[in-house]
Amino acid sequence: MKLAEALLLRSEYNNKIESLQERIKANVKVQEGDAPFEDPQALAEELFAVYESLYALIKKINLRNGATTLSSGVILSEALINREALIAKRRFIESVVEEATQRDYRSRSSEIKTKVVLSVKELQKQIDTLSKSFRELDTQIQSANWTTDLE
């Protein structure tokens, strides 16, 4: 199994867990005299089994991520952290640009005027640079995911 396949399986496990949790909640209480549509105890046992499978898979993924080196020489687990940092920085700058570009509407000329104190143009350049760095790093990560065996 390739690392990318394991990541897809991890996502499936997470979806299954969410589904089982909702099904348990929907069947844990019934009106007196009625029976639940599904046995919540059996669902809980299935949920715990999926949790165990998920945790075992995550351990394998994490071990492989720490042992895999990208073409750039960066360890995959470090690259994943770097990718998240790029996303966080870009989102923050995008929120600043959004705030800076919102129009202030004044109903009277006596209301306080506001001005933008940062260069939106420079912020956009930073977003573009971060986006490019993200794409390049993500391409390396995806390549490693599809070429690296999990075991």
Image: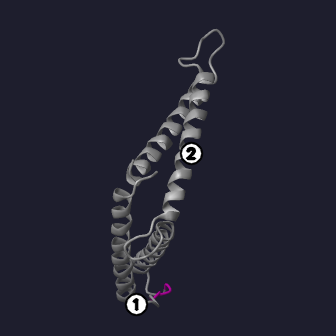
What amino acid is at disc 2?
Ala
Question: Which residue is depicted at the point 34% across and 80% down?
Answer: 128
Residue at point 38%, 53% (across, down)? 4
Find numbered disc 2 in the image and state the secondary structure of the residue it sits on: helix
Tell me where residue 27 appears, x and y as whole percent. Answer: 58, 23
Q: Which of marks 1 and 2 is nearer the N terminus?
A: 2
Q: Is residue 108 above or below residue 95?
A: below
Measured Cα–Cα span from mark 1 to mark 2: 48 Å
Q: What stretch is highlighted in magenta?
A: 111-115
Name above or below for residue 91 compared with residue 36: below
Instruction: Indicate which disc residue 93 carries.
Output: none
Kindly report the secondary structure that dominates the magenta region of the rendered protein.
loop
- Residue count near mark 2 (Cα–Cα under 10 Å), binned few <14, some 14–19, many ≥20: few
Task: Identify the image quadrant of residue 124.
Answer: bottom left
Mark 1 crowdedness (10 Å alpha carbons): few <14, some 14-19, many ≥20: few
Q: Identify the element where label 1 is drawn.
A: loop
Residue 19 placement, left or right of 135 = right
Q: Which mark is residue 119?
A: 1
Label 2: which residue?
Answer: 56
Residue 136 in the figure: left or right of residue 78: left
Q: Is residue 146 left or right of residue 69?
A: left
Q: Are marks 1 and 2 in contact (CB under 8 Å)?
A: no
